Image: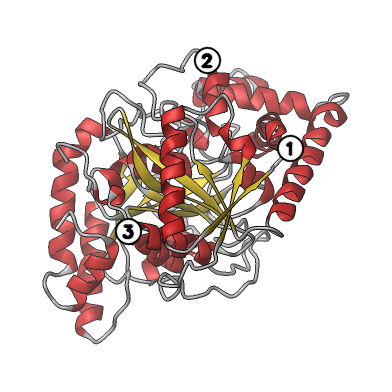
Amino acid sequence: MHQLTLAEIARGLADKKFSSEELTKVLLARIAQLDPQLNSFISLTEDLALSQAKAADVRRANGESGALLGAPIAHKDLFCTQGIRTSCGSKMLDNFKAPYDATVVAKLAAAGAVTLGKTNMDEFAMGSANESSYYGAVKNPWNLEHVPGGSSGGSAAAVAARLLPAATATDTGGSIRQPAAFTNLTGLKPTYGRVSRWGMIAYASSLDQGGPLARTAEDCAILLQGMAGFDPKDSTSIDEPVPDYSAGLNGSLQGLRIGLPKEYFGAGLDPRIAELVHNSVKELEKLGAVVKGISLPNMQHAIPAYYVIAPAEASSNLSRFDGVRFGYRCENPKDLTDLYKRSRGEGFGPEVQRRIMVGAYALSAGYYDAYYLKAQKIRRLVKNDFMAAFNEVDIILGPTTPNPAWKLGAKNNDPVAEYLEDVYTITANLAGLPGLSMPAGFVDGLPVGVQLLAPYFQEGRLLNVAHQYQLNTDWHTRTPTGF
């Protein structure tokens, strides 16, 4: 049963081949057996999962149906879950039990999804390797000596190892798409505002977006259907109708215009990944797509702009964690200043401290105009590049990452080298565009992803292209040895 996709689970439950309770017990046992190798979970919620599974079985027995009714999933540990630890991968929130459910959690629970637990992540979603977690690094099931990507590495590793069929994740600069590429999954970052951020602990509020991680585009369509929609509690949520993503999967790709930016194929890209990207283009051409060269001239400025904007917003968002109201508090503070300093110094890890310091500096008097304001201007130029490109093409295609997954610890002493791994993903966050990574082959036994970008609210187009590609390739069906 652990090899079933979400779509296959939905059909199996509908045909009464197994119950949600049976499936949930199988997967919980599998997690207990295999996750010690991966460290992909922070918290398991066995009692909640079994009660939700039994409730889903009763709903089905009473005539209800739905693709998510009785389907097991997990949540990245920054989605608030009522009465359950929501740690954000940090010592700061190790003792925090959320008093409410995030909108995403509530919507999926209402649809009948079964929550198996909360997945490991980079601390406060800051990282590209899932090595900054207070609970230890997550390991890539394709090679346990390599990183699974971050910050949604726990969700990615758990799904890739067939511990569960799908999981929620978040993407601030590529944190859904990069782990998907590193673990042979399909991962979708929706348009900014498509999925509610209410109850999702913030890293950088103008960049963060929740989305699905699964093995297929079909499964991502099912999970996104349950997550998406307007939320009046979230001031950045956009009141835009949510289409039936599954219904749009089988559209023809005849005449689809694919843009290949020349900036994607420079010196920093592993030539073996470049070859796999071009192979995926040939597959799409067989399906009727037309390829055109385009340019995104301001892409070279995206990383410096992102690493000013994101830390600036983080320094503001994380100022609330002060040892007073909730979260970690130092022992025996001498006074209020000592309480603030030691609670934050002891509660936050080195990567979070680094980004807070960078962000506070960029926002400080005398440097705001020189750094933060300039970065926001570059952000607008990046968006303009995409708008011009989408006048000529329907989607933009390229590599998800410049390299395959690196070894654990390989970039720990060089944070800038790790930041540069986000070069292809962060532009979508700066512009607020939807982006998807899909499996496209292997380099040295490690998975490689291809990224698709589309205009605003065209998630359906991305899912359609990825689904058609997956009907004609088998990369997404490969399973890591031992799992």
- Residue at position x 46%, y 28% in the image: 271
Q: Which mark is residue 476?
A: none
Q: CA distance from mark 1 to mark 3?
A: 34 Å
Q: Quadrant of residue 56?
A: bottom left
Residue 383 is situated, as x and y percent measured from the top left of the image, at 73, 49
- Residue at position x 30%, y 50% in the image: 476
Q: Which mark is residue 298?
A: 1
Callout in the foreground (1, 2) = 1
Nearest to the observer: residue 280 or residue 54 = 280
Q: Quadrant of residue 25?
A: bottom left
Q: Of label 1 and label 3, which has the lower sequence position?
A: 1
Task: Identify the element where label 2 is drawn.
Answer: loop
Q: CA distance from mark 1 to mark 2?
A: 25 Å
Q: For this view, does 301 lie left or right of residue 217? A: right
The residue where tag 2 is placed is 414
Q: Can residue 89 be seen at all in this image of the molecule?
A: no
Q: Counting other residues with Cα less than 10 Å from the Cα at mark 1, is it few (<14), some (14-19), or many (20 or more)?
A: some
Work out whether 41 lies above or below 351.
below
Check disc 3 and give the amino acid type.
Asn
